[in-house]
Amino acid sequence: MTATGQTTSTETPGDNWVANQPYLLLSITALCWAGNAVVGRLAAGHIPPVTLSFLRWLLAFLIVLPFAWKHLVQDWPAIRSKLGLMITLSIIGIGAFNTLQYWALEHTQALNTLLLQSAAPLLVALWSLVILGIRLTAAQGFGVLLSMCGVLTILLHGDFTTLSNIEFNKGDLIFMVALLIFALYSVLSLKRPAMHGLSFLAFTFGAGAACLIPLEIWELYARPVMKLDAPNLLTLLYVAVFPSTLAYLCFNRGVRLIGANRAAPFFHVVPVFGSVMAMVFLGERPQAFHFIGFALVLSGVFAASRKQAA
């Protein structure tokens, strides 16, 4: 691990161009996650939160396993050497975070979670300081604050006075706990043993789903069972493929390449992509605040994630 929190790794072939482009990988992650809050909100009341999380990761595990199996066999000694850490990462980054996120969306609006998500880079910085002893640089701090202003500009339609009209509830508290947990996962993932990215996904997806089995059994007795209709099945397919398999593969690799602090500002790109999707698929008209917000977010992400001069 370098002094900046960046970890060198031979887990991905050096001639794989995409796998060595951290900004592209983290942008793909943000694109995949952009629709997750909306899908999770639409699923509320139709798919119980533990069921949604459990089936999401079980399906993602089954998708990844055929491609990861040979790497898992090769990497098993490395996994076993830090088995406690690997199980911890599975529980917090896979099982706990997503279950809490879906639970929160039963009690709050997607807008609230997007607003709260703007604090994620600061939570990552806190865990980086506590666990790795790495402080935000002045440029990173400025970039995080600048991109946060851009997020708020987009979500509040340029009118910051509307903040006083937003009501926060227990769902927002649950989501803040979820963010704190995922920030911890982002930093702790830098301490994982060197292994292929698919090995890491397969193990954490499988172990994360397994840790949810007791909660899933309880939920099957405590709440109505999910209906096997087309909307629910499409929801499960979406969350298993895009915000799970593809996004986590890209996110883990991006953090591995540039460190958690430089990767965290890409959380702020999520609402940017969400706004663009609304324009493309929902016919929303672009407004001046969109362009101002986009410019602030992208400028902030650039300032916070670029490599500092030696």
Image (tube, rainbow, N blue to C red):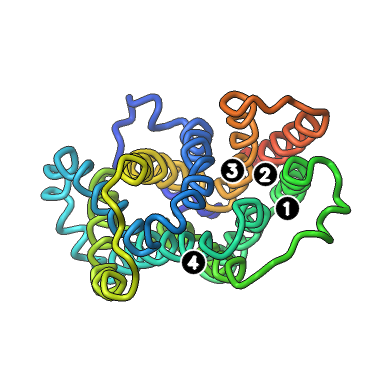
Q: Which residue is mark 2?
A: 304
- Asked whether disc 2 touches disc 1, contact meaning CB atoms under 8 Å apart, the reply is yes
Mark found first going from the N terminus, 4 or 1:
1
* Residue hosting label 3: 266
Q: Nearer the viewer, mark 4 or mark 2?
A: 4
Residue labelled with disc 1: 141
The answer, for residue 10, to whether it is visible in the render is no
Judged by depth in the image, the label closer to the viewer, 1 or 3, is 3
Residue sitting at 51 percent across and 44 percent down? 258
Name the residue at 31% across, 71% down. Answer: 219
Disc on the earlier residue, 1 or 3: 1
4 and 2 marks in contact (CB < 8 Å): no
User: Against 41, is 271 above or below?
Assistant: above
Q: In the image, what residue type sits under mark 1?
A: Gly
Identify the residue position indicated by label 4 in the image: 181
Query: Which amino acid, mark 2?
Result: Ala
Question: x, y (%) of residue 110?
Answer: 60, 52
Give the number of the mark in front: 2 or 3. Answer: 3
In the figure, 292 relative to 244: above or below?
above
CA gap between label 4 and label 2 equals 22 Å
Near mark 1 (Cα within 10 A), the count class, few <14, some 14-19 or many ≥20, is some
